[in-house]
Image (spheres, coloured by chain):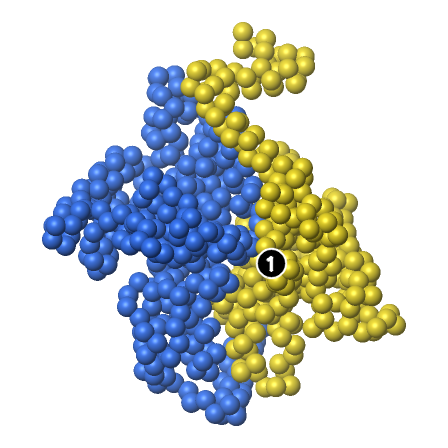
Amino acid sequence: MTTTEVLRKKSRQRKITIQVLLVIISIIAIWGAVSSAQVNLAALGITNGFGFLDRSTGWDYSFSLVERSINDPYSKTLVIGFQNTIFVGFISIFFATIFGFIIGTGRDSSHPGVKAAATVFVQTFRNIPLILQGVFLYSVLIHFPGPRQSMSFADSVFLSNRGLMLPGLNVSPSVAVALILAIASVAVLLVWRKVPLLRGLIIWIAAAISMSVIVAFVMRPEGEPLLSIPSLKGLRFNGGITVSIELVAMITAITLYGSAYIAEVVRGGLKQVPSGLIEAGQAVGLTQGQIWHRIKMPMSLRSIIPPLGNQWIFIMKATTIGIAIGFSDMFYIVSNSITQSGQTLELIFLLMAAFLTVNFSISIFTNWLNNRLKLKAH
Amino acid sequence: MAHTQKLSPNRFHAYMASFSKRAFGTPSAAVLSIVIFGALGYWTWLAVDWAIFRAVWSAENVAHCTEEAGACWSVIDARHRLILFGLYPYEEHWRSTFACLSIIATVIISCFPATWTAKRLTSLWVAGFAAYYLLMEGSLLGLAQVTTDGWGGLSLTLFLFASVVLLGMPMGLGLALMRRSEMPVVRSFAVIVIDTIRSLPLLTTLFTAAVVVPILLPSWLEGDKIWRVIIAFSLFFGCYQAEVFRGGFQAIPKGQFEAGKALGIGYWKIMARIILPQVFRHALPSTINMVVVTFKETAIVIIIGFFDVLASAKAAFGTGEWAPHYMEVYVFVGAIYWTFIFSLGQYGEYLKGRMALSTH
């Protein structure tokens, strides 16, 4: 055998040894963890397994989209926590993306005033920890005056220490959920059919408004108006939608923080559009708006989508700050369940599985979007 | 015409000319400028008026803190030691002060390019961290011993920050090297760890370290809660930093590694002498960004029961007497975070710009 072959063989053997060692160490670590978990849990008198999911919880929490009671089993409570996380996450993602695109475009503007305002926004909300912004907003909201002295806008939107009262469609919650799902599926359909961005947006908004009006007209209770507007009756509000202050604080804080980050992503994307293209647009007499939606956006969207997907995942993860202000998101429910039931391992497993599923789905969606927008091979 | 403006000998004049053209060039731009600058100016005036002109400054004057008065900084005057040092023994606060200064000095010194070699940066951070730990813990210097339970406030936040960066950096490097390995088992191990940790919220990781790990470990291995949380936090930092390093590795032509191999240089020597110095250089702006994010994320430890600067801020207005002045306390803590994060972030941006220039 030549020296080269000896050396190659040695190197191959070393690589195999290292990998085998890594596998063995991992197995020992997992085995050790399992066996000491058995010892420790037996000492605490806790039975393993998911049997506890059928037991009723016996404690209440701040928010749910469906009816809840303290007799609900753990399984239902956990599902509600998961719903709440998805709910807050998607609403925040929706608003943060819209504001992020507006502010990011503002950061890219040649108008010094617009640029200054966008910069102040980004530098304020990006440079303070999200949890600090959340608890600060929450403190401000609980110190708001009561319903009688509430802040009102156009006598139909009220903000008090009881929450944000909004006018709503006069339909039952389940109809509202179905309507929201239908509007969302229109958006998916438009993206899927590759309708151009701006036209798609206009079609979508028009569809959303007309669907809402029709549904409200058909499904409202007999003889009631289309919109239910909150009004002060004695010490509390009647009608409309009440958004609790925990939810207002959560959504506002996450949206502001997230949109500052998305604005930077958008600005980065817009900066990569070659200036020659923009000048060409000016030369053929396009307006600023046309240059934005016909040249800048299509060109920059390709570099915006991957980091935008990361920001969406980030926003989803950021909903865990709910526990700091008492909003019952997934983490809050899991943490409470652990204190109450002691089924630590099972609950943490469910928590991790939930987040891995959601974030994995978001990244599949953004990869799909990215492939869709990619330049086809010439 | 445009040329004469651009070639103006005075840069300030040229800038002002371009500014007024962009801001007031067309009627609609002028209206927009007036509205935006008016609103920004008005809000700035409101903020300055509240925070400075109508403010009450000292703790003795707390009686002046009425509805009409502006910010009541008396609460900061009275409670700043609690916010900065937590429940650290009162007479020993000088130790906490110097310990914090040593961390801040470490961060500032590592911004100078003269320190940017692996050896210097490592020794600087180890020295800064050691100075902090010795001063705070005290028993080795012959001072009264204060265990980590007694640490709190801004000094605890800085401690978490420094230890996470110090421990997380080698973890990140290790994971990045593993991810580039030719050995499939090693590579997939790194990929699984990095992707899992990055998909989970930081809070879940820290909570697992604080609550679940004691169940999974035999009691002799359990250690202090704070160290478990720091190690989990470092792992989080390491996983993100590994991706930053990966970006740095991608910027280096493969030929360099192969050239080293052809000359018969070993793997570790190629890494240490050829590849890593360049990786560090390329990854520097993103690394600074990661460090900034880490400082910001430390605020989350309040949820798993640590007395960091946010928790001590809550305690500062927690007593009935100061309860109405929660706003001032949050503004104070927010300003601390903002100053640190904004200045480091701006420095990172500046560095990115400078590096982009140097590579072309």
Colour for chain B in the figure: yellow
The amino acid type found where label 1 is placed reads: Ala
Q: Position of residue B240 (x, y in %)?
A: 55, 57
Viewer-nearest residue: B183 or B335: B335
Residue to which mark 1 is pinned? B323
Viewer-nearest residue: B359 or B293: B293
> Quick check: can you spot residue B178?
no
**Quadrant placement of the C terminus of chain B:** top right
Q: Residue at x 57, y 74 (%)?
A: B210
Q: Is residue A346 left or right of residue B133?
A: left
Question: What count of labels does the image hold?
Answer: 1
Q: Position of residue B67 (x, y in %)?
A: 59, 46
Q: Position of residue B170 (x, y in %)?
A: 65, 62
Question: What chain does badge 1 belong to?
Answer: B
Q: Residue furthest front?
A: A234
Q: Residue at x 36, y 21 (%)?
A: A287
Give residue B316's quadrant in the image. Answer: bottom right
**Quadrant placement of the N terminus of chain B:** top right
Q: Position of residue A286 (x, y in %)?
A: 35, 20
Give residue B75's quadrant in the image. Answer: bottom right
Viewer-nearest residue: B36 or B181: B36
Q: Which chain is blue?
A: A
Q: Residue furthest top?
A: B1
* Figure check: A213 above or below B94: above
